Amino acid sequence: MSADLTRLSAASLAEKLTAGEVTSVEATQAHLDRIAAVEPAVHAFLHVSGEEALAVAADVDARRAAGEALHPLAGVPIAVKDVVVTKGLPTTAGSKILEGWVPPYDATLVERIKAAGLPILGKTNMDEFAMGSSTEHSAYGNTHNPWDLTRIPGGSGGGSAAAVAAYEAPLAIGTDTGGSIRQPGAVTGTVGVKPTYGSVSRYGLIAMASSLDQAGPVTRTVLDSALLHELIGGHDPRDSTSIPESLPDLVGAARRGASGDLTGVRVGVVKELSGEGYQEGVSARFAESLALLQAAGAEIVEVSCPHFEYALGAYYLIMPSEASSNLAKFDGMRFGLRVEPTDGPVTAERVMAATRGQGFGDEVKRRIILGTYALSAGYYDAYYGSAQKVRTLIQRDFAAAFAQADVLVSPTAPTTAFKLGEKLDDPLAMYLNDVATIPANLAGVPGLSVPNGLSDDGLPVGFQVLAPAKADDRLYRVGAALEALLEKTWGGPLLAQAPELEVAK
Ligand SMILES: NC(=O)C[C@H](N)C(=O)O
Protein backbone atom coordinates (compact mmCIF):
# COMPACT_ATOMS: atom_id res chain seq x y z
CA MET A 1 0.00 0.00 0.00
CA SER A 2 2.54 2.53 1.11
CA ALA A 3 4.92 1.70 -1.77
CA ASP A 4 2.05 2.19 -4.22
CA LEU A 5 1.32 5.66 -2.92
CA THR A 6 4.79 6.80 -3.97
CA ARG A 7 4.27 5.56 -7.53
CA LEU A 8 1.16 7.65 -8.16
CA SER A 9 1.24 10.88 -10.11
CA ALA A 10 0.40 13.96 -8.04
CA ALA A 11 -2.91 14.26 -9.91
CA SER A 12 -3.93 10.68 -9.07
CA LEU A 13 -2.80 11.03 -5.47
CA ALA A 14 -4.80 14.27 -5.21
CA GLU A 15 -7.89 12.45 -6.50
CA LYS A 16 -7.51 9.71 -3.90
CA LEU A 17 -7.08 12.31 -1.16
CA THR A 18 -10.18 14.19 -2.30
CA ALA A 19 -12.18 10.95 -2.46
CA GLY A 20 -11.09 10.11 1.07
CA GLU A 21 -9.41 6.86 -0.07
CA VAL A 22 -6.14 7.83 1.57
CA THR A 23 -5.05 10.48 4.04
CA SER A 24 -2.28 12.98 3.60
CA VAL A 25 -0.56 11.53 6.66
CA GLU A 26 -0.44 8.12 4.93
CA ALA A 27 0.82 9.62 1.68
CA THR A 28 3.40 11.78 3.42
CA GLN A 29 4.60 8.91 5.60
CA ALA A 30 4.92 6.68 2.51
CA HIS A 31 7.23 9.24 0.91
CA LEU A 32 9.24 9.69 4.11
CA ASP A 33 9.69 5.90 4.26
CA ARG A 34 10.82 5.87 0.66
CA ILE A 35 13.26 8.71 1.39
CA ALA A 36 14.69 6.75 4.34
CA ALA A 37 15.04 3.68 2.13
CA VAL A 38 16.73 5.15 -0.94
CA GLU A 39 18.57 8.26 0.31
CA PRO A 40 21.72 6.31 1.24
CA ALA A 41 22.03 5.51 -2.49
CA VAL A 42 20.57 8.64 -4.14
CA HIS A 43 21.30 11.57 -1.78
CA ALA A 44 18.72 13.89 -3.33
CA PHE A 45 18.02 15.76 -0.08
CA LEU A 46 20.12 18.12 2.01
CA HIS A 47 17.50 18.31 4.72
CA VAL A 48 14.41 16.20 5.37
CA SER A 49 11.64 17.91 7.33
CA GLY A 50 9.57 14.85 8.27
CA GLU A 51 8.00 16.17 11.45
CA GLU A 52 6.92 19.44 9.90
CA ALA A 53 5.55 17.64 6.83
CA LEU A 54 3.50 15.21 8.94
CA ALA A 55 2.09 18.09 11.01
CA VAL A 56 0.90 19.84 7.82
CA ALA A 57 -0.52 16.54 6.55
CA ALA A 58 -2.45 15.97 9.79
CA ASP A 59 -3.82 19.50 9.64
CA VAL A 60 -4.98 19.04 6.03
CA ASP A 61 -6.62 15.72 6.93
CA ALA A 62 -8.47 17.35 9.82
CA ARG A 63 -9.64 20.25 7.65
CA ARG A 64 -10.79 17.85 4.96
CA ALA A 65 -12.65 15.75 7.50
CA ALA A 66 -14.36 18.92 8.73
CA GLY A 67 -15.63 19.55 5.21
CA GLU A 68 -13.41 22.55 4.41
CA ALA A 69 -12.93 23.35 0.71
CA LEU A 70 -9.27 22.67 -0.04
CA HIS A 71 -6.87 23.32 -2.91
CA PRO A 72 -6.90 20.39 -5.39
CA LEU A 73 -3.28 19.54 -4.47
CA ALA A 74 -3.82 19.86 -0.70
CA GLY A 75 -2.06 17.05 1.12
CA VAL A 76 0.23 16.06 -1.79
CA PRO A 77 3.84 16.21 -0.54
CA ILE A 78 6.51 18.23 -2.32
CA ALA A 79 10.30 18.73 -2.24
CA VAL A 80 11.88 22.18 -2.63
CA LYS A 81 15.27 23.02 -4.14
CA ASP A 82 17.59 24.42 -1.50
CA VAL A 83 18.01 27.75 -3.33
CA VAL A 84 14.45 28.70 -2.31
CA VAL A 85 14.15 30.21 1.16
CA THR A 86 11.92 28.41 3.64
CA LYS A 87 11.05 29.92 7.01
CA GLY A 88 12.39 27.74 9.81
CA LEU A 89 14.07 25.21 7.48
CA PRO A 90 17.82 25.41 6.77
CA THR A 91 18.60 26.89 3.36
CA THR A 92 22.13 26.63 2.01
CA ALA A 93 21.88 26.91 -1.80
CA GLY A 94 24.39 24.05 -1.78
CA SER A 95 27.06 26.33 -0.30
CA LYS A 96 29.21 26.18 2.82
CA ILE A 97 28.87 29.94 3.11
CA LEU A 98 25.21 29.52 4.12
CA GLU A 99 25.72 26.52 6.39
CA GLY A 100 23.47 26.84 9.43
CA TRP A 101 21.36 29.69 8.04
CA VAL A 102 17.67 29.36 8.86
CA PRO A 103 15.66 31.96 6.91
CA PRO A 104 13.20 34.12 8.85
CA TYR A 105 10.76 34.28 5.90
CA ASP A 106 9.26 32.22 3.08
CA ALA A 107 9.69 32.73 -0.66
CA THR A 108 6.37 33.69 -2.26
CA LEU A 109 6.14 30.32 -3.97
CA VAL A 110 6.67 28.58 -0.62
CA GLU A 111 3.94 30.73 0.92
CA ARG A 112 1.62 29.57 -1.85
CA ILE A 113 2.60 25.92 -1.35
CA LYS A 114 1.95 26.23 2.38
CA ALA A 115 -1.34 28.09 1.91
CA ALA A 116 -2.52 25.29 -0.39
CA GLY A 117 -1.62 22.66 2.23
CA LEU A 118 1.21 20.73 0.53
CA PRO A 119 3.53 19.13 3.11
CA ILE A 120 7.17 20.06 2.40
CA LEU A 121 9.28 16.90 2.63
CA GLY A 122 12.60 18.72 2.61
CA LYS A 123 15.21 20.67 0.68
CA THR A 124 16.97 19.17 -2.33
CA ASN A 125 20.63 19.09 -3.30
CA MET A 126 21.99 21.34 -6.02
CA ASP A 127 25.15 22.78 -7.50
CA GLU A 128 26.40 25.59 -5.25
CA PHE A 129 24.29 28.69 -5.98
CA ALA A 130 22.86 26.79 -8.98
CA MET A 131 26.16 26.89 -10.85
CA GLY A 132 26.59 23.66 -12.74
CA SER A 133 25.00 20.92 -14.79
CA SER A 134 25.69 17.85 -12.65
CA THR A 135 25.07 18.78 -8.97
CA GLU A 136 28.74 17.88 -8.40
CA HIS A 137 29.45 21.48 -7.39
CA SER A 138 27.34 21.05 -4.26
CA ALA A 139 29.37 21.55 -1.09
CA TYR A 140 27.42 18.65 0.43
CA GLY A 141 28.24 15.69 -1.78
CA ASN A 142 26.96 14.22 -5.02
CA THR A 143 23.43 13.23 -5.92
CA HIS A 144 23.20 9.99 -7.90
CA ASN A 145 21.03 9.40 -10.96
CA PRO A 146 18.39 6.78 -10.06
CA TRP A 147 18.80 5.22 -13.56
CA ASP A 148 22.46 4.51 -12.87
CA LEU A 149 23.98 5.49 -9.54
CA THR A 150 27.43 6.02 -11.08
CA ARG A 151 26.05 8.88 -13.18
CA ILE A 152 25.09 12.51 -12.62
CA PRO A 153 21.44 13.55 -12.17
CA GLY A 154 21.97 16.77 -14.14
CA GLY A 155 22.19 20.17 -12.58
CA SER A 156 21.89 22.46 -10.99
CA GLY A 157 18.63 20.98 -9.75
CA GLY A 158 19.81 17.36 -9.71
CA GLY A 159 18.37 16.80 -6.24
CA SER A 160 14.83 17.77 -7.23
CA ALA A 161 14.94 15.68 -10.42
CA ALA A 162 16.46 12.63 -8.67
CA ALA A 163 13.92 12.86 -5.81
CA VAL A 164 11.04 12.80 -8.28
CA ALA A 165 12.61 10.06 -10.45
CA ALA A 166 13.31 7.89 -7.36
CA TYR A 167 9.70 8.24 -6.10
CA GLU A 168 10.84 10.17 -3.03
CA ALA A 169 8.46 13.00 -3.95
CA PRO A 170 5.69 13.30 -6.56
CA LEU A 171 6.38 17.01 -7.01
CA ALA A 172 9.42 19.23 -6.64
CA ILE A 173 10.43 22.83 -7.19
CA GLY A 174 13.44 23.69 -9.33
CA THR A 175 15.00 26.87 -10.65
CA ASP A 176 16.32 27.42 -14.15
CA THR A 177 18.87 30.09 -15.08
CA GLY A 178 20.31 28.33 -18.12
CA GLY A 179 18.69 24.90 -18.03
CA SER A 180 18.74 23.77 -14.39
CA ILE A 181 15.17 22.46 -14.46
CA ARG A 182 15.05 21.10 -18.01
CA GLN A 183 18.45 19.38 -18.30
CA PRO A 184 18.08 17.40 -15.03
CA GLY A 185 14.59 16.49 -16.26
CA ALA A 186 16.04 15.15 -19.52
CA VAL A 187 18.73 13.02 -17.91
CA THR A 188 16.50 11.54 -15.19
CA GLY A 189 13.41 10.83 -17.31
CA THR A 190 11.26 13.45 -15.56
CA VAL A 191 9.27 16.48 -16.71
CA GLY A 192 10.64 19.96 -16.01
CA VAL A 193 9.29 23.37 -16.91
CA LYS A 194 10.91 26.78 -16.96
CA PRO A 195 7.98 29.22 -16.99
CA THR A 196 7.95 32.56 -18.81
CA TYR A 197 10.32 34.97 -17.07
CA GLY A 198 8.25 36.99 -14.60
CA SER A 199 5.37 34.54 -14.37
CA VAL A 200 6.52 32.82 -11.17
CA SER A 201 7.71 35.14 -8.40
CA ARG A 202 11.46 35.29 -7.71
CA TYR A 203 10.87 36.74 -4.24
CA GLY A 204 12.77 34.48 -1.88
CA LEU A 205 14.93 32.73 -4.49
CA ILE A 206 18.62 33.16 -3.67
CA ALA A 207 19.55 34.97 -6.86
CA MET A 208 22.26 33.80 -9.23
CA ALA A 209 21.49 35.91 -12.33
CA SER A 210 18.36 37.94 -11.70
CA SER A 211 17.49 38.61 -15.34
CA LEU A 212 17.58 34.86 -16.12
CA ASP A 213 16.47 32.98 -12.97
CA GLN A 214 13.02 31.42 -12.96
CA ALA A 215 11.45 28.83 -10.63
CA GLY A 216 9.29 26.06 -11.98
CA PRO A 217 7.89 22.54 -11.56
CA VAL A 218 9.70 19.18 -11.60
CA THR A 219 7.31 16.21 -11.86
CA ARG A 220 6.75 12.80 -13.43
CA THR A 221 3.88 13.87 -15.73
CA VAL A 222 3.08 16.92 -17.84
CA LEU A 223 -0.31 17.37 -16.13
CA ASP A 224 1.38 17.42 -12.72
CA SER A 225 3.69 20.20 -13.91
CA ALA A 226 0.68 22.21 -15.09
CA LEU A 227 -1.04 21.77 -11.71
CA LEU A 228 2.07 22.86 -9.80
CA HIS A 229 2.81 25.72 -12.20
CA GLU A 230 -0.70 27.13 -11.67
CA LEU A 231 -0.21 26.88 -7.91
CA ILE A 232 3.11 28.76 -7.76
CA GLY A 233 2.59 31.21 -10.65
CA GLY A 234 0.84 34.53 -11.06
CA HIS A 235 1.49 38.11 -10.07
CA ASP A 236 3.47 39.00 -6.95
CA PRO A 237 3.90 42.68 -6.02
CA ARG A 238 7.08 41.75 -4.07
CA ASP A 239 8.93 40.89 -7.30
CA SER A 240 9.37 43.96 -9.49
CA THR A 241 9.78 41.79 -12.60
CA SER A 242 6.56 39.87 -11.95
CA ILE A 243 4.05 40.04 -14.82
CA PRO A 244 0.85 41.74 -13.63
CA GLU A 245 -1.44 39.32 -15.44
CA SER A 246 -2.93 35.96 -14.66
CA LEU A 247 -1.54 32.78 -16.22
CA PRO A 248 -3.14 31.13 -19.24
CA ASP A 249 -5.14 27.93 -18.58
CA LEU A 250 -2.25 25.48 -18.18
CA VAL A 251 -4.14 22.53 -16.72
CA GLY A 252 -6.79 22.84 -19.43
CA ALA A 253 -4.07 22.85 -22.09
CA ALA A 254 -2.44 19.73 -20.60
CA ARG A 255 -5.77 17.88 -20.52
CA ARG A 256 -6.54 18.93 -24.08
CA GLY A 257 -3.09 17.84 -25.24
CA ALA A 258 -3.48 14.41 -23.64
CA SER A 259 -6.09 13.57 -26.28
CA GLY A 260 -3.13 13.37 -28.66
CA ASP A 261 -4.66 15.62 -31.31
CA LEU A 262 -2.40 18.40 -32.59
CA THR A 263 -4.29 19.31 -35.74
CA GLY A 264 -3.20 22.70 -36.99
CA VAL A 265 -0.33 23.19 -34.52
CA ARG A 266 2.80 24.46 -36.26
CA VAL A 267 5.93 22.90 -34.73
CA GLY A 268 9.21 24.61 -35.63
CA VAL A 269 12.38 22.54 -35.56
CA VAL A 270 15.29 24.82 -34.70
CA LYS A 271 17.99 24.01 -37.22
CA GLU A 272 20.79 25.25 -34.96
CA LEU A 273 19.75 23.01 -32.03
CA SER A 274 20.44 19.59 -33.47
CA GLY A 275 22.98 17.63 -35.47
CA GLU A 276 26.65 18.01 -34.63
CA GLY A 277 27.48 17.57 -30.96
CA TYR A 278 24.27 15.68 -30.18
CA GLN A 279 24.58 12.02 -29.21
CA GLU A 280 23.24 9.65 -31.87
CA GLY A 281 20.53 8.19 -29.64
CA VAL A 282 19.41 11.71 -28.69
CA SER A 283 19.00 12.68 -32.35
CA ALA A 284 17.27 9.40 -33.21
CA ARG A 285 14.67 9.78 -30.42
CA PHE A 286 14.14 13.40 -31.46
CA ALA A 287 13.40 12.40 -35.06
CA GLU A 288 10.96 9.70 -33.89
CA SER A 289 9.14 12.16 -31.64
CA LEU A 290 8.78 14.60 -34.53
CA ALA A 291 7.21 11.84 -36.63
CA LEU A 292 4.70 11.16 -33.82
CA LEU A 293 3.77 14.85 -33.61
CA GLN A 294 3.30 14.95 -37.36
CA ALA A 295 1.09 11.86 -37.27
CA ALA A 296 -0.96 13.62 -34.56
CA GLY A 297 -1.74 16.41 -37.01
CA ALA A 298 1.04 18.89 -36.31
CA GLU A 299 2.66 20.72 -39.18
CA ILE A 300 6.45 20.42 -38.92
CA VAL A 301 8.47 23.35 -40.26
CA GLU A 302 12.18 24.04 -40.11
CA VAL A 303 13.18 27.39 -38.64
CA SER A 304 16.56 29.02 -38.36
CA CYS A 305 17.79 31.01 -35.35
CA PRO A 306 21.23 32.05 -36.57
CA HIS A 307 22.30 33.85 -33.38
CA PHE A 308 21.72 30.86 -31.10
CA GLU A 309 25.31 29.97 -31.92
CA TYR A 310 26.38 32.85 -29.67
CA ALA A 311 23.93 32.15 -26.84
CA LEU A 312 26.34 30.15 -24.67
CA GLY A 313 29.02 32.84 -24.99
CA ALA A 314 26.59 35.63 -24.13
CA TYR A 315 25.22 33.63 -21.18
CA TYR A 316 28.71 33.12 -19.75
CA LEU A 317 29.20 36.90 -19.68
CA ILE A 318 25.76 38.05 -18.52
CA MET A 319 25.23 35.31 -15.90
CA PRO A 320 28.62 35.74 -14.11
CA SER A 321 28.29 39.53 -14.26
CA GLU A 322 24.98 39.37 -12.43
CA ALA A 323 26.18 36.58 -10.13
CA SER A 324 29.29 38.51 -9.07
CA SER A 325 27.06 41.34 -7.96
CA ASN A 326 24.36 39.14 -6.36
CA LEU A 327 26.90 37.15 -4.35
CA ALA A 328 28.58 40.25 -2.90
CA LYS A 329 26.18 40.09 0.05
CA PHE A 330 27.74 36.86 1.35
CA ASP A 331 30.44 38.53 3.36
CA GLY A 332 30.51 36.83 6.76
CA MET A 333 28.55 39.68 8.32
CA ARG A 334 24.95 38.87 7.49
CA PHE A 335 24.28 35.18 6.85
CA GLY A 336 25.67 31.78 7.77
CA LEU A 337 29.42 31.26 7.85
CA ARG A 338 31.83 33.76 9.43
CA VAL A 339 35.56 33.07 9.38
CA GLU A 340 37.90 35.24 11.43
CA PRO A 341 41.51 35.27 10.29
CA THR A 342 43.92 33.86 12.87
CA ASP A 343 47.08 35.32 11.37
CA GLY A 344 46.64 39.01 12.09
CA PRO A 345 44.12 41.76 12.82
CA VAL A 346 40.40 40.97 12.63
CA THR A 347 39.22 43.77 10.38
CA ALA A 348 35.93 43.75 8.45
CA GLU A 349 37.77 43.38 5.15
CA ARG A 350 39.88 40.49 6.39
CA VAL A 351 36.83 38.69 7.79
CA MET A 352 35.10 39.08 4.42
CA ALA A 353 38.13 37.77 2.55
CA ALA A 354 38.56 34.79 4.89
CA THR A 355 34.83 33.95 4.85
CA ARG A 356 34.52 34.15 1.08
CA GLY A 357 37.80 32.30 0.59
CA GLN A 358 36.62 29.36 2.67
CA GLY A 359 32.89 29.56 2.09
CA PHE A 360 32.75 29.56 -1.73
CA GLY A 361 33.70 26.59 -3.89
CA ASP A 362 35.87 26.77 -7.01
CA GLU A 363 33.08 27.12 -9.58
CA VAL A 364 31.53 30.02 -7.66
CA LYS A 365 34.91 31.74 -7.40
CA ARG A 366 35.49 31.16 -11.11
CA ARG A 367 32.21 32.89 -11.99
CA ILE A 368 32.73 35.78 -9.57
CA ILE A 369 36.14 36.42 -11.15
CA LEU A 370 34.72 36.15 -14.69
CA GLY A 371 31.84 38.47 -13.86
CA THR A 372 33.95 41.05 -12.07
CA TYR A 373 36.32 41.11 -15.03
CA ALA A 374 33.50 41.42 -17.58
CA LEU A 375 32.08 44.40 -15.68
CA SER A 376 35.37 46.20 -15.05
CA ALA A 377 36.01 49.65 -16.48
CA GLY A 378 37.58 49.40 -19.91
CA TYR A 379 36.13 45.93 -20.59
CA TYR A 380 32.47 46.59 -19.86
CA ASP A 381 31.49 47.54 -23.43
CA ALA A 382 33.58 44.84 -25.05
CA TYR A 383 32.21 41.99 -22.91
CA TYR A 384 29.02 42.76 -21.00
CA GLY A 385 27.84 45.30 -23.60
CA SER A 386 28.37 42.94 -26.56
CA ALA A 387 26.68 40.10 -24.70
CA GLN A 388 23.62 42.27 -24.15
CA LYS A 389 23.54 43.02 -27.88
CA VAL A 390 23.68 39.31 -28.64
CA ARG A 391 20.79 38.85 -26.25
CA THR A 392 18.70 41.26 -28.32
CA LEU A 393 19.60 39.38 -31.51
CA ILE A 394 18.51 36.11 -29.90
CA GLN A 395 15.21 37.68 -28.89
CA ARG A 396 14.73 38.75 -32.51
CA ASP A 397 15.52 35.22 -33.72
CA PHE A 398 12.77 33.93 -31.43
CA ALA A 399 10.31 36.56 -32.66
CA ALA A 400 10.98 35.62 -36.29
CA ALA A 401 10.74 31.89 -35.54
CA PHE A 402 7.46 32.29 -33.64
CA ALA A 403 6.02 34.09 -36.66
CA GLN A 404 6.41 30.76 -38.50
CA ALA A 405 5.59 28.30 -35.73
CA ASP A 406 3.42 28.06 -32.59
CA VAL A 407 6.12 26.19 -30.66
CA LEU A 408 9.79 25.47 -31.26
CA VAL A 409 11.36 22.11 -30.47
CA SER A 410 14.79 20.55 -29.98
CA PRO A 411 16.47 17.87 -27.91
CA THR A 412 16.73 19.21 -24.33
CA ALA A 413 20.34 18.18 -23.75
CA PRO A 414 22.98 17.00 -26.22
CA THR A 415 23.86 13.84 -24.28
CA THR A 416 22.46 11.46 -21.69
CA ALA A 417 23.70 11.45 -18.09
CA PHE A 418 27.49 11.24 -17.98
CA LYS A 419 29.58 9.55 -15.31
CA LEU A 420 30.20 11.30 -12.01
CA GLY A 421 33.58 13.00 -12.25
CA GLU A 422 33.74 12.83 -16.05
CA LYS A 423 33.45 16.59 -16.73
CA LEU A 424 34.41 17.99 -13.37
CA ASP A 425 37.80 19.27 -14.49
CA ASP A 426 36.56 20.69 -17.77
CA PRO A 427 34.28 23.70 -17.17
CA LEU A 428 33.65 24.22 -20.88
CA ALA A 429 32.45 20.64 -21.36
CA MET A 430 30.15 21.16 -18.37
CA TYR A 431 28.80 24.43 -19.80
CA LEU A 432 28.02 22.79 -23.15
CA ASN A 433 25.24 20.71 -21.55
CA ASP A 434 23.09 23.82 -21.73
CA VAL A 435 23.52 24.74 -25.42
CA ALA A 436 19.89 23.98 -26.21
CA THR A 437 18.33 25.37 -23.04
CA ILE A 438 20.11 28.73 -22.61
CA PRO A 439 18.47 30.64 -25.51
CA ALA A 440 15.08 30.50 -23.72
CA ASN A 441 16.54 32.10 -20.59
CA LEU A 442 18.19 34.88 -22.59
CA ALA A 443 14.85 35.69 -24.26
CA GLY A 444 12.61 35.06 -21.22
CA VAL A 445 10.46 32.54 -23.10
CA PRO A 446 9.11 29.39 -21.44
CA GLY A 447 10.43 25.86 -22.03
CA LEU A 448 9.43 22.32 -21.10
CA SER A 449 11.34 19.06 -21.18
CA VAL A 450 9.42 15.80 -21.50
CA PRO A 451 11.04 12.34 -21.52
CA ASN A 452 11.06 10.93 -25.05
CA GLY A 453 12.84 7.62 -24.80
CA LEU A 454 16.11 5.91 -24.05
CA SER A 455 19.31 6.43 -25.97
CA ASP A 456 21.45 3.50 -27.16
CA ASP A 457 23.10 3.50 -23.73
CA GLY A 458 19.74 2.76 -22.08
CA LEU A 459 19.55 6.19 -20.43
CA PRO A 460 16.70 8.70 -20.71
CA VAL A 461 16.53 11.51 -23.23
CA GLY A 462 14.42 14.70 -23.17
CA PHE A 463 12.41 16.57 -25.80
CA GLN A 464 12.28 20.36 -25.39
CA VAL A 465 9.27 22.50 -26.32
CA LEU A 466 9.60 26.32 -26.35
CA ALA A 467 6.76 28.83 -26.65
CA PRO A 468 6.45 32.60 -26.90
CA ALA A 469 6.44 34.57 -23.62
CA LYS A 470 3.15 34.26 -21.75
CA ALA A 471 2.02 31.36 -23.96
CA ASP A 472 3.11 28.63 -21.50
CA ASP A 473 -0.18 26.82 -22.23
CA ARG A 474 1.26 25.76 -25.61
CA LEU A 475 4.07 23.89 -23.84
CA TYR A 476 1.52 21.85 -21.95
CA ARG A 477 -0.63 21.07 -24.95
CA VAL A 478 2.26 19.82 -27.06
CA GLY A 479 4.12 18.23 -24.13
CA ALA A 480 1.05 16.30 -22.96
CA ALA A 481 0.29 15.15 -26.50
CA LEU A 482 3.81 13.81 -27.01
CA GLU A 483 3.77 12.17 -23.59
CA ALA A 484 0.46 10.42 -24.34
CA LEU A 485 1.62 9.25 -27.78
CA LEU A 486 4.94 7.96 -26.46
CA GLU A 487 3.41 6.19 -23.47
CA LYS A 488 1.17 4.34 -25.88
CA THR A 489 4.24 3.00 -27.66
CA TRP A 490 5.99 2.14 -24.37
CA GLY A 491 2.90 0.72 -22.70
CA GLY A 492 3.34 3.04 -19.68
CA PRO A 493 5.59 5.79 -18.35
CA LEU A 494 9.28 5.78 -19.29
CA LEU A 495 10.27 5.73 -15.61
CA ALA A 496 8.68 2.29 -15.30
CA GLN A 497 11.68 1.08 -17.33
CA ALA A 498 14.21 2.36 -14.77
CA PRO A 499 15.93 -0.33 -12.72
CA GLU A 500 14.57 -0.80 -9.19
CA LEU A 501 16.82 0.81 -6.59
CA GLU A 502 18.34 -1.37 -3.92
CA VAL A 503 16.38 -0.35 -0.87
CA ALA A 504 17.96 0.12 2.57
CA LYS A 505 16.07 -1.85 5.21
N1 LIG B 1 21.63 27.36 -13.20
C1 LIG B 1 21.43 26.84 -14.37
O1 LIG B 1 20.37 26.99 -14.96
C2 LIG B 1 22.47 25.91 -14.83
C3 LIG B 1 23.54 26.26 -15.70
N2 LIG B 1 24.08 24.96 -16.03
C4 LIG B 1 24.59 27.07 -15.04
O2 LIG B 1 25.55 26.50 -14.64
O3 LIG B 1 24.53 28.24 -14.95
Image (cartoon, grey):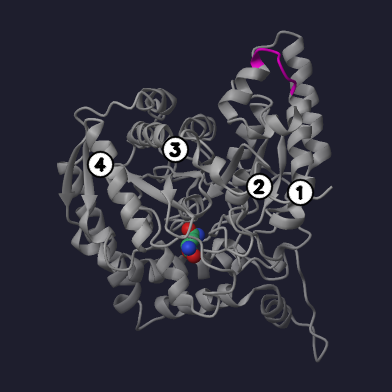
| Kind of residue sitting beneath label 3 | Trp
Q: Which residue is mark 2?
A: 500
- Image position of 123 with respect to 257: above or below: below
Q: Secondary structure at mark 2?
A: loop
Of the numbered discs 4 and 1, the one sitting upstream in the chain is 4
| Kind of residue sitting beneath label 4 | Ala
- Image position of 24 with respect to 302: above or below: above
Of the numbered discs 2 and 3, the one sitting upstream in the chain is 3
User: How many residues crowd mark 1 within 10 Å: few (<14), some (14–19), many (20+)?
Assistant: few
Of the numbered discs 3 and 4, the one sitting upstream in the chain is 4
Circles 1, 2 touching at the beta carbon (< 8 Å): yes
Quarter the N terminus occupies: top right
| Residue 443 in view, yes or no | no
Spot occupied by residue 11 in the image (x, y as percentages of width and height): 56, 26
Distance between mark 3 and mark 4 Cα atoms: 16 Å
| Kind of residue sitting beneath label 2 | Glu
Instruction: Specify the segment rendered in magenta.
Output: 18-23
As for residue 19 lying within the magenta part, the answer is yes
Q: Is mark 4 within 8 Å of ligand 1?
A: no
Q: Which residue is mark 3?
A: 490
Circles 2, 3 touching at the beta carbon (< 8 Å): no
Q: Secondary structure at mark 4?
A: helix
Q: Can you name the residue that lies furthest to the top here?
A: 67
Of the numbered discs 2 and 4, the one sitting upstream in the chain is 4
Badge nearest the viewer, 1 or 3: 3
Q: Is mark 1 within 8 Å of ligand 1?
A: no
